[in-house]
Amino acid sequence: MANSKGKNTVSVVEEIARPIAAELGLEIWDIRYLKEGSQWFLRIFIDKDGGVDINDCERMSRALDEPLDKADPIDGEYILEVSSPGIERELVKPGHFERFIGADIMIKMIRPLEGIGKEFKGVLTAYGDGDVTITDHSGENTVTINKKDAAYIKLDDFD
């Protein structure tokens, strides 16, 4: 969605949020601007080594209030939410995939893959140009999919 200044809302918010996060010792994991029911939500997911807590979320939220109000990148009312991406964080950006090569992941496909189905788990073994390679835990089966064909790809920290 473009804002009144013609730029993508998420891009504008990221330009504002990234240096603020860095000053607080945090990184921006992801930013989403979406409508749920009649409400618009600006969700900023933050991370740091060792994980974030409620105090990190509160500090980031307070630090963003004034710069967001001043820049006014969003037309209309919205609810700002700052949170952790969680244990089962969704891998979205190329850097996420590169950082977690060797980690357990779970994939849910938009359409089932023949012989595999719609959901599968394994180890992220490679990533490049949107292609995600996952090897099952037996090490016998390897599948490469394009991330645009997946409903989601998340870390799987529960096995």
Image (cartoon, rainbow, N blue to C red):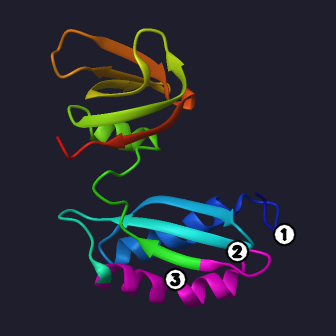
Amino acid, disc 3: Leu
* Gap in angstroms between the C-alphas marked 1 and 2: 19 Å
* Gap in angstroms between the C-alphas marked 2 and 3: 20 Å
Asked if the residue at tag 3 contacts the one at tag 2, i.e. Cβ–Cβ closer than 8 Å, the answer is no
Q: Position of residue 119 (x, y in %)?
A: 41, 29
Bin the neighbour count of mark 3 within 10 Å (Cα to Cα): few under 14, some 14-19, many 20 and up: some
Identity of the residue drawn at 21% across and 46% down:
157
Which residue bears the numbered disc 1?
4
Which residue bears the numbered disc 3?
64
The magenta stretch is 55-79
Q: Quadrant of the N terminus?
A: bottom right
* Gap in angstroms between the C-alphas marked 1 and 3: 20 Å
Give the mark nearer the N terminus: 1 vs 3.
1
Q: What secondary structure is marked by label 3? A: helix
Q: Position of residue 156 (x, y in %)?
A: 26, 42
Q: What secondary structure is marked by label 2? A: strand
Amino acid, disc 2: Gln
Q: Position of residue 134 (x, y in %)?
A: 31, 22
Identity of the residue drawn at 46% across and 44% down:
92
Q: Is residue 97 shown left or right of residue 2?
A: left
Residue closest to the eye, 32 or 69: 32
Q: Is residue 72 magenta?
A: yes
Bin the neighbour count of mark 2 within 10 Å (Cα to Cα): few under 14, some 14-19, many 20 and up: few
Q: Is residue 135 shown left or right of residue 152?
A: left
Which residue bears the numbered disc 2?
39
Res. 10 image quadrant: bottom right
